[in-house]
Amino acid sequence: MIVSPLAHRFVAAANHEPRRSGRAVDMLLLHYTGMTSAEAACELLCSAESGVSCHYLVDEGGTITQMVGEEARAWHAGVSCWQGETDTNSRSIGIEIHNPGHQFGYRDFPAAQMQSVIALCRDILTRHAIAPRNVLAHSDVAPGRKVDPGERFDWPLLFREGIGHWVPPAAADDRRLGPADLAELQRLLKDYGYGIEVTGEPDEPTRKVTDAFQRHFRPALVNGVADHCVLQTAQRLLATV
């Protein structure tokens, strides 16, 4: 079993299995717990009846609990898609970061917690070939269904510490995109990995993916509207892949 040397404790989760088809890990997926306490989250994630699990949990004080060995497939992503693949669980390691979430009083992630997340991410990246663009939010792979870890999560801090992919957002420009520009945005987002089709239409899948992209890469305004700021930010992002 692959156990991180940074884990303060190991509490075994019931729900895990071998990675399907021998799929190698090439994604790191960050979540928030969306629960009132880290203890309740750990209990849920370890329960057989819950139907979920995760590799790691980081509480607000920075304590790291491991629940599933990194070699195993945990059940944390659910219905999801990235780069055209839908079995996200077989290719990813999941970290649950305790935060009450949007339902129970969403708040900033404390410094001690963020430092543990950074250290854990770095440790995981030493063992697995995970490209920066594949360090992702749950919302990136499940747009419209999930919003975590949300717009308060400090992705720029992770990037400064050598984790993940990020660019400074373009200047605010809330003009909506016409069909040609919208098709370009859809193409850019699809090329990056999002589950979206190029239609040139402001359809519901585009709204959901735009919302997810904003939470990660343009958190100052999350409204699902494909505007010129979103387009220019996506252009900057793809230019640095």
Image: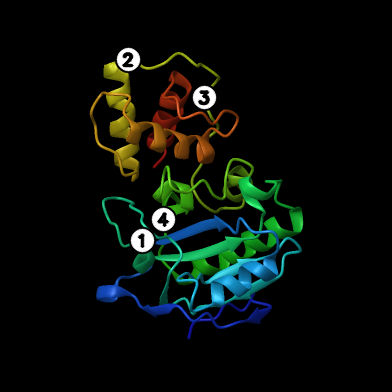
Type of amino acid under label 3: Ala
* 4 or 3: tag closer to the N-terminus: 4
Task: Judge left or right: residue 141 versus residue 102.
Answer: left
Q: Position of residue 173 (x, y in %)?
A: 51, 16
Q: CA distance from mark 3 to mark 2?
A: 18 Å
* Residue 145, x across and y down, in percent: 43, 47
Report how far apart the C-alphas of labels 1 and 4 lie in the structure.
15 Å
Q: Nearer the viewer, residue 154 or 39?
A: 39
- Please tell me which of labels 2 and 4 falls first in the chain: 4
Outermost residue on the front side: it is 49
> For mark 2, what is the residue?
178
The kind of residue on which mark 1 rests is Thr
Q: Nearer the viewer, mark 3 or mark 2?
A: 2
**What kind of element bears circle 2?**
loop
Residue assigned mark 3: 170
Residue 137 visible in the displayed image: no
Mark 1 lies on residue: 88
- As drawn, the label of residue 126 is none
Task: From the image, state whether disc 2 or disc 4 is nearer to you.
Answer: 2
Residue at 46%, 60% in the rendered image? 28
Are there few (<14), some (14-19), or many (20+) residues within 10 Å of tag 4? some
Instruction: Nearest to the eye among marks 1 and 4: give it.
Output: 1
Q: Which dot, 1 or 3, sits closer to the camera?
A: 1
Badge 4 is on which residue?
131
Question: Do tag 1 and tag 3 residues touch (Cβ < 8 Å)?
Answer: no
Taking the spot 35% from the left edge, 42% from the top edge, the residue there is 192
Rounded to the nearest angstrom, the CA distance separating label 1 from label 3 is 30 Å
- Callouts 2 and 4 close, C-beta under 8 Å: no
Q: Amino acid at mark 2?
A: Gly
Quarter holding the C terminus?
A: top left
- Calculate the distance from the C-alpha at mark 2 to the C-alpha at mark 4: 33 Å
The answer to whether mark 1 and mark 4 are in CB contact below 8 A is: no
